[in-house]
Amino acid sequence: MGRDKHVLFVTFFLQAHFRGMYRYAVSLAKRGVKITFVALAREIALLRNFEELRTLDFNLVSYHDYGENNFETPSEVPVVDVLEFLATGRLRFQPVLDKLVARQKAGLAGPTCVFGDRTLIWAKDAAKELGIPFVQFWTCGAGYMRALQAQVSLYADGTLKIRRGAGGCPYLEPFEGHVHVAGLPPLEHRDIRKPFQLDFKNACVRNDIEIGTIVNMADAVIVNSFYEFEAPQIDAIRQTWLDRCTTESKIPKMFLVGPLSAHVSTVVEDRSLVDRSSGVDALQWLDRRSPLSVVYICMGTVVRLTRSKVEELAAALEASEQSFLWIVSRGVKDLIPLGFEARTRENGLVVNGWVPQLRILQHSAIGGLVTHCGWNSVLESIMSGVPMAAWPQMLTDQYYYCRHIVDVLKVAVEVLQPETLSSAAEKAAVTSLTFPKRYVTLEQAVRILLSEEGNALRARAQKLKKKAEAAVADGGASSNAMNDVFEFIPS
């Protein structure tokens, strides 16, 4: 068991990040590892009600618990701005760190390892101050890790250039053609994560280049993926570490523990499937549908589609005349065109709110997923053997994963978004109403997923599903990596 092993989890509140780290923390606690789990007060208040934690050595700490700060109160529940949190996280965490350092100096037992969300670049400094190992936790895949790792040198050698616009805001200088990075498919301008800096009340300046730098400096990295799904990216990351070995003192350990949701399910997933507004149960609705006859649409918990995007999607679903299950996040349902739900009632269902996505994807009626290419959606679709229509919406990791599932794995088709095209030839083609061949419209995507062409995508997705199942089975690579992490944690 894990007696005397003690992990400090420093978390980021976005659901895809938070759920992954919480899942992992619970899995370690069930093996006897003591957990100190640091999160916002609203998350801590929620977790205190979880029965599963009451039998575990699981210490819940909010950023407010040790000393006063100006960021939140224990009863605060509003949504925290993402960029504000990234900028002020170090200051939020400082009272917690001060308490841990004081306990350590007093000779009291404390954490023996820090697991920090990849976005929290200051978590590594906290581990250094405590004199314990630091593990960079990637709830997403190795592709984005490789991209940020590579950007460090791409900016340094001038392949990518940062310019300053109005007000000094940084932007990526436009370029034609592709950037070639070992382990990644060829990248266009629109595919590359754009640099940004944030000065918030003189608290912090954050840049993704720092995240990429820490990839090479952490004691270890945990990645929610498995080798067969991202082999080129994983190999390239490891090769970069080996290439640096002549001048650097150590090579980080990499633990591929994905898919995490296959290892451990928690009460975070125990939510209702009943639509808040209609009272219709989504699973019961799917039970009445034929196998592989429904397209599932979900844009995650962060993406907020614009009115024009919502109207485009609604028009595509209606014109396709295919069965669909559309999950909409807060505020989006109000943007759906008037009369759409009534006109599509016979073959479609709109659910307003959160649903346990893996249960939906694994239903026999689901024939495809229209996705924003968030990592959890991509990975859970593969775990279910479901093909995808890639419709990325945010210039974060979503375009990298779009390229991977479309160009490399060939388990998805890509939806045309004229505003994102970086090729002059493709822009000209759209302007002249000639359709670039490598894209499809939303309506075409819906039809393809439920067609013979979709079956070819599905066959490749099913092969990857079997590899994911093998990875998480007893004795599989991901299961072994979970054991290796346990052994890595010092006592």
Image (spheres, grey):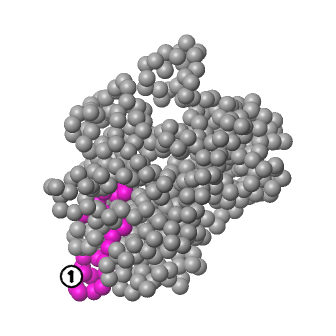
Q: Residue at x 52, y 16 (%)?
A: 429
Pick the quarter of the image with the C terminus: bottom left
Give the mark count: 1
Residue bearing mark 1:
105
Tag 1's secondary structure? helix
Magenta extent:
100-125
Q: Residue 313 appears in which quarter of the rendering?
A: top right
Residue at the image position 47 percent from the left and 26 percent from the top: 421
Q: Residue at x 28, y 65 (%)?
A: 219
Q: Nearer the viewer, residue 229 or 327?
A: 229
Please tell me in which quadrant of the rendered image residue 85 appears.
Answer: bottom left
Q: Is residue 196 left or right of residue 157?
A: right
Instruction: Find the residue positioned furthest to the top.
Output: 432
* Residue 38 image position (x, y, % from top left): 40, 69
> Can you give x and y, in whole percent of width and height, for residue 348 in the image?
77, 43
- Could you tell me residue 294's position as x and y percent? 74, 45
- Is residue 128 in sight in this rendering? yes
Give the amino acid type for the residue marked by disc 1 in the picture.
Lys
Q: Is residue 183 left or right of residue 204?
A: right
Can you give x and y, in whole percent of width and height, for residue 239 in the image? 30, 52
Q: Is residue 203 magenta?
A: no
- Residue furthest left as drawn: 247
Of 119 and 168, the residue lying toward us? 119
Query: Camera-side residue: 427 or 277?
Result: 427
Answer left or right for 65 relative to 403.
Answer: left
Say which residue appears at 55% left-offset and 28% top-offset: 438
